[in-house]
Image (spheres, rainbow, N blue to C red):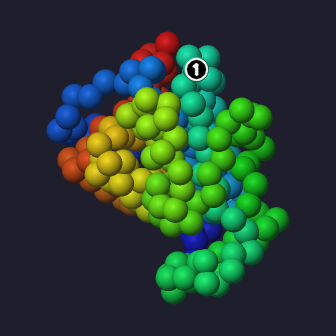
């Protein structure tokens, strides 16, 4: 398989039917900005939807999170991965990204005090210290934004749920291969492992 090219679609507007009524508490939350690297964002037409909306929404949520003292964590896959480290991912996605493509996009450059996790598998928890950091911070909610909704975003949400961390996926601050993939990922999260939010709702909670 390979990543798509020039992805353009409208963010799904229909509301998900959330099973849970969890609310975001800034004192319990962590913001996870998932895989917003040059390599992955290149799949999209940046001047069109969904990225035209998603990137500013991520930036606004990040600004509110920082203002409230919510930890901001980035995931980023390493470039030029050793085939032994990459392992089974190669069978699905090939050798991965080059070192020149591993940086976070300029619009969302991490601050010096943000946390950057090396991303080895679909879930941000896999082979990282995210769970340990959250326990150390005394936080058990994870606000997730970024790409791709039906792969790493959804898997991270499910992994969080299985660790008794409440995931909140921001519907209009994530992007995917297609509108259908995006919608399916949101439906899965809403009915199986988390809560689907809007940027407006998250910003209100953080303020």
The reply to whether residue 94 is in sight is no
In the image: residue 143, left or right of residue 164: right
The single residue placed furthest to the right in the displayed view is 100
The single residue placed furthest to the top in the displayed view is 207
Q: Is residue 102 above or below residue 25?
A: below
Q: Position of residue 183 (x, y in %)?
A: 34, 52
Depth check, front residue: 12 or 127: 127
In the image: residue 98, left or right of residue 138: right
Q: Position of residue 194 (x, y in %)?
A: 29, 42
Depth check, front residue: 179 or 107: 107
| Residue ID for mark 1 | 69
Depth check, front residue: 203 or 9: 203
Q: Position of residue 133 (x, y in %)?
A: 52, 41
Q: Is residue 57 above or below residue 44?
A: above
Residue at left 58%, top 71%?
A: 3
Crowd class of label 1 (few under 14; some 14 to 19; many from 20; radius 10 Å): few
Quadrant in which residue 24 is drawn? top left
Residue at left 49%, top 35%?
A: 136
Question: At numbered mark 1, what does the secondary structure look like: helix, strand or loop?
Answer: loop
The single residue placed furthest to the left in the displayed view is 19
Q: Position of residue 206 (x, y in %)?
A: 48, 19
The reply to whether residue 114 is in sight is yes
Q: Is residue 25 above or below residue 110?
A: above
In the image: residue 107, left or right of residue 143: right
Number of marks present in the image shown = 1
Depth check, front residue: 105 or 42: 105
Residue at left 51%, top 66%?
A: 121
In the image: residue 164, left or right of residue 128: left
Residue at left 59%, top 41%?
A: 73
């Amino acid at each position: 398989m390979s990543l798509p090219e020039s992805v353009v679609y409208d963010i799904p507007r229909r509301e998900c039917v959330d099973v849970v009524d969890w609310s975001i508490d800034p004192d319990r939350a962590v913001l996870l900005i998932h895989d917003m690297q040059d390599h992955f964002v290149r799949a999209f037409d940046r001047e069109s939807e969904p990225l035209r909306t998603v990137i500013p929404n991520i930036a606004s949520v990040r600004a509110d999170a920082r203002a409230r003292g919510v930890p901001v964590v980035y995931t980023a896959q390493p470039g030029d991965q050793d085939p032994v480290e990459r392992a089974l991912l190669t069978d699905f996605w090939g050798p991965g990204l080059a070192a020149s493509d591993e940086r976070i996009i300029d619009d969302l450059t991490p601050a010096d005090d943000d946390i950057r996790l090396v991303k080895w598998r679909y879930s941000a928890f896999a082979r990282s210290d995210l769970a340990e950091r959250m326990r150390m911070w005394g936080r058990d909610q994870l606000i997730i934004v970024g790409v791709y909704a039906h792969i790493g975003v959804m898997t991270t949400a499910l992994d969080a749920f299985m660790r008794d961390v409440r995931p909140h996926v921001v519907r209009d601050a994530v992007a995917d291969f297609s509108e259908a993939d995006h919608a399916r990922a949101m439906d899965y999260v809403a009915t199986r492992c988390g809560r689907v939010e809007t940027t407006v709702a998250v910003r209100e909670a953080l303020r």
